[in-house]
Image (cartoon, grey):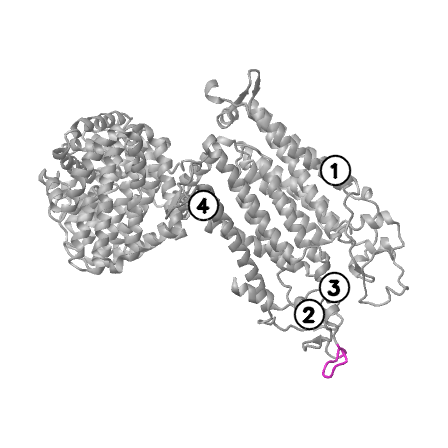
Amino acid sequence: MASNNTLRSYSIIPCFIFVELVIMSGTVLLAYYMECTDLFSVHVQGFFCNDAELMKPYPGTEESSFVPPLILYCVVAAAPTAVIFIGEVSMYVMKSTREALLAQEKTIVTGDCCYLNPLVRRIVRFIGVFAFGLFATDIFVNAGQVVTGGLSPYFLSVCKPNYTGTECRFNHQFIINGNICTGSPIMVESARHSFPSKDASLSVYSAVYLTMYITSTIKTKSSRLAKPVLCLGTLCSAFLTGLNRVSEYRNHCSDVVAGFILGSSIALFLGLCVVNNFKGVHSAAAKQKTEEYRGLPLMTFPRVESPLETLSAQQ
Amino acid sequence: MVSLYFLELTDVVQPAQVGFRCHDRELSLPYVDGGDELIPLLMLLSLAFAGPAASIMVVEGVIYCLQSRLKLRRAEESINAGGCNFNSFLRRTVRFVGVHVFGLCATALVTDVIQLSTGYHAPFFLTVCKPNYTQAGVSCDKNPYVTKDICSGHDQHAIMAARKTFPSQHATLSAFAAVYVSMYFNSTISDSTKLLKPVLVFAFAISAALSGLTQVTQHRSHPIDVYVGFLIGAFVATYLAVHAVANFKSSDDNTQPPTPPPPKEDPLRALTERGHESVYNKGPASASESNDEIAAVPPPIDRLEGLGPLQREKASMGSLKRASVDVELLAPRSPMGKENMLTFSHTLPRASMSIDGVLGANERPEDPVQPVQSVQPVQRRLKAVQVPVDPMRSQQLVSEWKQKSMEMRGLSARDEAERDASEDGSDVGFVGTDDGGSQAPIYQPVVQSGRSASGQNPTPAQGGAKAVATPRPPQIPEAGPPPVSPKSALTRAKWLAIREKTSGDGSARAAANQPRLMQVIAMSKQQGLLPSSSGEKSSETPSTCSGASSKTNSPHYRPACEQQREGSGIVTVDAHAPHHPVVQALPPPQAPSLTGNGNPWELAGSPNGGNSRYTYDLNSLDRGDAVAHNSSFRPRRSTSRCATISPALPPSHSQEDMSVEAKIDMRRKTALVLLDREIRNQSDQENYYKSLQGRRFRD
């Protein structure tokens, strides 16, 4: 078993350090620059002075929201990490699942000393991919916000343009430059980041990733409802987070929908194409095919009562 | 290309005239001149072309450099075309980039057509149009919807551009490029680095999304235009990537894991069940129903095979039609009978036994080495049977089959017996797979040969000479000679078509994933891996040909087909069935020799070619292997050819097929030698199969 299941590889550590870590750090750096610095200035979007869409009341700062961003980000980052960690460890500890796990994954020996057992490999892989996706989602959202410069629904109440001035007198006058705003520039600036809703996309991303992990990994024979409840609960809370943004006038409906689509597509791509639906590398191909073959013919054919079947059932 | 030029750069086609509302706010956004655009169309075009093309070239170059060292994938064989040598790198690159360029043009064309036909206004329409609201006949007060052309702006070019917006050109092109190259990355870059693939994919996706969104922010198109554009571009890219380049698999790709197909029990068993329950006992209508149902099954299988479905479906439809045609032409000696037997021989132990006998007899006189070889398989077989068995089951089965056969009154004697045999054999085989072999010693050989036969494994042929001597199961003789009724014949033909197709599929799958599936019979089967697929293919060929012959109905052609059928080896006994009405009886020893003499072509093929090849292959396995997997799939091609050209088949064609079949015959012998190369063969086969299909597609 041991000799069967170990794989000697000298390239995994350098590969990990020089490829994965470089990519990861690049992603994190980019996300950091977009998030916390003014390196990329937002596109100044024009508007109509009396656009009813943009005249919603100002709901207060982000922190006063029903779902404060700080808490949201913490939950979004921590919950899947914790669940994946616990799930992997418990799968490793429990005897029944452990063998299946070991069959899927091989222990890798690099050099003489280092043993990377399946537990470590899986945890690093899944959580690493999750973190990468989180930052990638953030980059996507920030890029979209910066490039489009979509205006929040409360933009005009923050901008406070002079409605009696020459520029705002006509109904169909389109104002290109944003310097007719009399409100606080910081708030105006923050009101220009709306188009893909960041909260919506991040929460949906992590919810979908977590759901895929739970669905494909945890096999519970005893309780049939635990898995659906868990999955639907996470998905539901993510959707509610997005909808909350709309109801608080912080985002348009289209922003939230775009965020949903963005987050879920990233999560689906990562889950299906990158980590092979959370299966081990080796078993993924074979297992998939087995299911395909074994399931299909009998399922597709209408069931015909067969003497063969009854016979085998009796014996 | 030409139409693209006309649509894009000339005013030959005017966009449709669509009205607008007076002072529409949506349409009076500021106009950003073409020169001030963030991403002009020309830049977008060059980027959308150069980015994916460059990355495809780079990746292909890396693969090409690594493939020799890492053995990641074996090179597609170089093509030597009149002095020009195309290696795999060149071929793949040209193929993928070519499809990319084609897709870009197609996307642009589609976008232009939709733009012109819808003629929706861009957000800056009113700005550049400067409508003259005071013109006669236009009154914004009464009817705010203006359908006339009241533009007073001078920039005709801008007005024209403002009328073509609906799917945003930027969005479609960039989405196409991004999705295409993403699918390329997704299928090319291995899984060993987890983050490289998503980074590349996300980079392209984000640039595509941004280039689409700039159109919105610069008021050149509405958001809906951009979204629809994304969808169109992504759709075109997905379609092309999946269907035009087969998801970027190389045409004979070795990295493709040996698609472990299917426990063959399932499809076959289900089929047999259907076979007796619905097809036999119900009328032709239900048969056709079931036929349809089964016809719906193959796609999952075909999915694996890449481009398979179309060809497969076509072939199956063809066989279906042919079957019905055969029914119309039903005659005691009509090709249908042979076709049926062909079909049955897939799953039928006794037929295969007799085939084995024929083959063995065929080869023995010519081939002194043969007996020595034949000992091995037999031993192996006997070993393989050692599985728990239950006597009850086999007995009950037997009685069941008796019943069935009694019910099946509407069939001709030969057919009946034939089917009986086939059912019997296949079912015994199934029992064996489920519970182990049947217990009665009589049955052992039957089970064995049934297994090999259901795998359509002609290899045991050499060993099969012994199987001839095995006592036949008792239930055969009860097949009486009932009168032929057209209805039942029709049913049967349909059933046949189903059976033929599915058993072909099933056996193909079975052949591929033998190692996993049949531990029980692993030993007996291993040797036959290669020929099993070839057997399937070749068995398809004759049936097709018989259909063709029945269609053309030319006496000149039919003999060729029959001979051909004989040439394919497996079918030998069936082909002779008309001469020996009782096929189930042990094939008379002279039958094989008759076969050999019957068709001079076959004789010419096997004695000299086969023998020399055989011995030769013993010496050099490698070459035999290579040739084997080459030839093993040729019949498939010939099948399709046959199917397509069948209405007017030139006789020369049949000869060509003949030679192919003869080659298969030789190959079968080589297969014996290749016990340990199972896996390699498997992948080779698949690859070759893939490449075949891919090539056909390209053609």
Identity of the residue furthest to the bottom in this view: B136
Q: Which residue is mark 3?
A: B31
Boundaries of the magenta span: B132-141
Picture disc at residue A32: 1
Q: Nearer the viewer, mark 3 or mark 4?
A: 4
Q: CA distance from mark 2 to mark 1?
A: 43 Å
Q: Position of residue A196 (x, y in %)?
A: 71, 49
Residue B403 located left or right of residue B203: left
- Closest to the observer: B492 or B663? B663
On screen, residue B407 versus residue A151, left or right, reads left
Is residue B689 visible in the rendered structure shown here? Answer: yes
Q: Amino acid at mark 1?
A: Tyr
Structural distance between the alpha carbons of marks 4 and 1: 43 Å
Residue at the outermost front position:
B83
Q: Name the image quarter holding residue B353.
A: top left
Q: Secondary structure at mark 2?
A: helix
Q: Do the residues marked 2 and 3 share a common chain?
A: yes
**Does label 3 or label 4 sit earlier along the sequence?**
3
Q: Which residue is mark 4?
A: B91
Sort mark 2 into few (<14), some (14-19) or many (20+) by Cα contacts within 10 Å.
many
Chain under numbered label 2: B
Kindly report the distance in space between the C-alpha atoms of the residues bearing marks 2 and 4.
Answer: 45 Å
**Which secondary structure is most common in the magenta stretch?**
loop
**Nearer to us: label 4 or label 1:** 4
Q: Are marks 2 and 4 on the same chain?
A: yes
Relative image position of residue B299 (x, y in whole percent): 41, 48
In the rendered structure, which amino acid carries the disc numbered 2? Ile
Decide: is A170 above or below B277: below
Is B244 included in the stretch rendered in magenta?
Answer: no
Residue B159's disc number: 2
